[in-house]
Image (cartoon, helix red, strand yellow):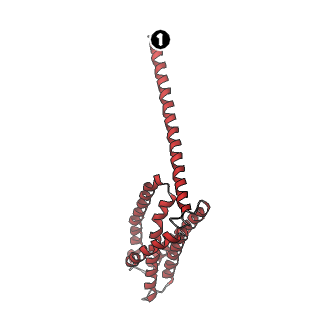
């Protein structure tokens, strides 16, 4: 049911986020919903209930909201020259977690008991809380540094801020390359001078 909910919700939420913006707050809402729904499931009695279906729908909604925001946010805050690296790094981290967490939850739920179930929900709640804290920090930083996540995606101010970020990154890269080139040349000259001195010394000795 979660993938079905996400399939229908992601296109809708993506369109809304592009027009409205507020990506940082959307991430906070997604993380807050995750924390709340896992806490609610943890406190429920272990018996069939229609509330479980509602919780599953909420999980699908917050996953869809997260997915519609996270990737476009990275392309906005990362300089154009580093977008591929940022997306690749994020994908790598995601794949690592998708490998490690199922192993962890499988070991926790090996006994298939209520305590094991609650322990899994507690772990998920902690992950959601960590996401909420991270999203809050990202939102605060964004509000202080150009509001690229808070403004609509095609707003001129967002495009200008991204252009300035790319230009700053390009300038810093050029400066770094020049410094490295200067150090390399200086090292080469020093090595050449030392070689000449050694050659002269050997000549004089002979």
Label 1 neighbourhood size at 10 Å, few (<14), some (14-19), many (20+)? few
Q: How far from the left and from the top, in percent, is residue 87?
A: 43, 59
Q: How far from the left and from the top, in percent, is residue 25?
A: 55, 70
Q: How far from the left and from the top, in percent, is residue 83?
A: 45, 56
The furthest residue to the front: 156
Tag 1's secondary structure? helix
* Residue, disc 1: 204
The quarter of the image holding the C terminus is: top left
The residue under the point 51% across, 34% down is 183
Residue closest to the eye, 77 or 200 = 77
Residue closest to the eye, 131 or 180 = 180
Relative to residue 159, is residue 186 depicted above or below?
A: above
Left or right side of 111 for 152? right
The furthest residue to the right: 144
The residue under the point 58% across, 64% down is 137
Relative to residue 91, is residue 6 depicted above or below?
A: below
Relative to residue 199, is residue 120 depicted above or below?
A: below
The quarter of the image holding the N terminus is: bottom left
Q: How many marks?
A: 1
The residue under the point 62% across, 61% down is 144
């Amino acid at each position: 049911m979660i993938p079905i909910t996400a399939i229908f919700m992601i296109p809708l939420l993506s369109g809304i986020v592009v027009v409205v913006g507020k990506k940082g707050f959307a991430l906070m809402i997604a993380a807050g919903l995750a924390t709340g729904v896992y806490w609610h499931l943890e406190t429920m009695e272990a018996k069939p209930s229609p509330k479980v279906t509602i919780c599953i729908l909420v999980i699908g909604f917050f996953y869809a909201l997260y997915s519609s925001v996270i990737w476009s946010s990275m392309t906005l805050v990362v300089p154009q020259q580093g977008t591929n690296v940022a997306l690749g790094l994020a994908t790598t981290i995601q794949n690592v977690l998708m490998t490690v967490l199922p192993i962890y939850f499988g070991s926790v739920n090996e006994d298939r008991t209520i305590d094991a179930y609650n322990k899994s929900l507690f772990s998920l709640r902690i992950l959601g809380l960590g996401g909420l804290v991270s999203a809050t920090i990202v939102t605060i930083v964004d509000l202080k540094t150009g509001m690229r996540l808070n403004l609509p995606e095609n707003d001129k101010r967002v495009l200008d801020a991204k252009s300035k970020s790319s230009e700053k990154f390009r300038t810093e890269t050029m400066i770094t390359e020049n410094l490295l080139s200067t150090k390399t040349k200086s090292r080469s000259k020093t090595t050449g001078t030392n070689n000449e001195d050694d050659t002269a010394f050997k000549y004089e000795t002979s």
